[in-house]
Amino acid sequence: MLVRCPSCRVTFPTERTGAQECPSCGKPLVVPEAPQAVPAGTQSSFPPGGEPPEPGTPWEERDRLGFWRAWWDTVVQALFEPARLFRSARLDKGAAQLGFVLLTAGVPWFTGQLVERALLRPWTQRAIESMGSTPMGPLLQRVFALGADTSPRSAVLVALLTPLLVLVFLYLNAAVTHLAALLLGQAKRGFAATFAACAYACAPLLLLAIPGCGAAIAVVWTTVLTGVGVKETHRIGTGGAAAAVLAPWVLVCCAACALGMIGGFAARGIPQ
């Protein structure tokens, strides 16, 4: 039988049950007896659908592992072993997954805004002032002035709004992705599976703490992990998962191109 070590989470084969040591980390563990076959006509202990419950991600086992270790292990697995993480995600831990996103995305986002205001704002201001003679210069200066407030009141407002914006991003991303999966016939395990995929796929948003290129890298990486997550949580193929994740982006690009063409015709005047 295959056994997963609760300490290092490595899966290894064993021929016996009872107390033994993990061959990977050497820590003691107890292998339970093999479950008895369910007689015909009796109710299985598995949930509807005939599948055993997921073992849970490190974050979902933080009561046993400890808060920071569970968070760090989850981030590392999401970034470098995403299939393993998403495969073990439970579908009844939406609140825990939401908390992971608020910690992993909200804090770095707020930190990145503070760093940008403190270090990059003067450089950005000089660059925009040098564009004052260009057609877009006055507009850029007005936009910059709206966000130039560095008072403590502004910092408090940003701190209060950041979690709300993170929630909007998470639920909007999950809703759009799940709708696309439904339309494509790929939503095999319900919205909870899509939500878990979108939640743990937010691990790269740690890069929001880096002003400038951090946001661009984080968005691309998050999109890729969302595809991996949808594939694993819904137990579907790679093509179906990629289509469910990329379809909304394709529609947005097509809509932007259409609006650009309409705006171009309107600016030049449509021939009669």
Image (spheres, rainbow, N blue to C red):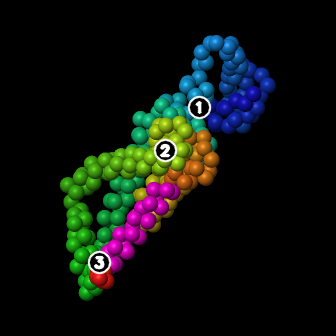
What distance separates the C-alpha of mark 3 from that of mark 1? 57 Å
Which amino acid is tagged 1?
A: Pro
Which amino acid is tagged 2?
A: Leu
Count every numbered label the image shows and give the total.
3
Which amino acid is tagged 3?
A: Ala
Determine the residue positioned at 73% across, 24% down: 20
| Mark 2, residue position | 182
Does residue 229 show up magenta in the picture? no
Residue 268: x %, y % from top left: 30, 83
Could you tell me which secondary element the residue under label 3 belongs to? helix
Work out whether residue 256 or residue 16 is closer to the camera in this orientation and state it: 256
Front tag of 1 and 2: 2
Location of the N terminus by quadrant is top right
Work out whether residue 30 or residue 238 is closer to the camera in this orientation and state it: 238
211 is higher (above) or lower (below) than 85: below
Determine the residue positioned at 71% across, 19% down: 34
Q: Are marks 3 and 2 in contact (CB under 8 Å)?
A: no
User: Horizontal placement of 133 versus 167: left or right?
Assistant: left
Could you tell me which secondary element the residue under label 2 belongs to? helix
Residue 47: x %, y % from top left: 55, 24
What distance separates the C-alpha of mark 3 from that of mark 2? 37 Å
| Mark 1, residue position | 55
78 is higher (above) or lower (below) than 136: above
Q: Are marks 1 and 2 in contact (CB under 8 Å)?
A: no
Image quadrant in which you'd find residue 41: top right
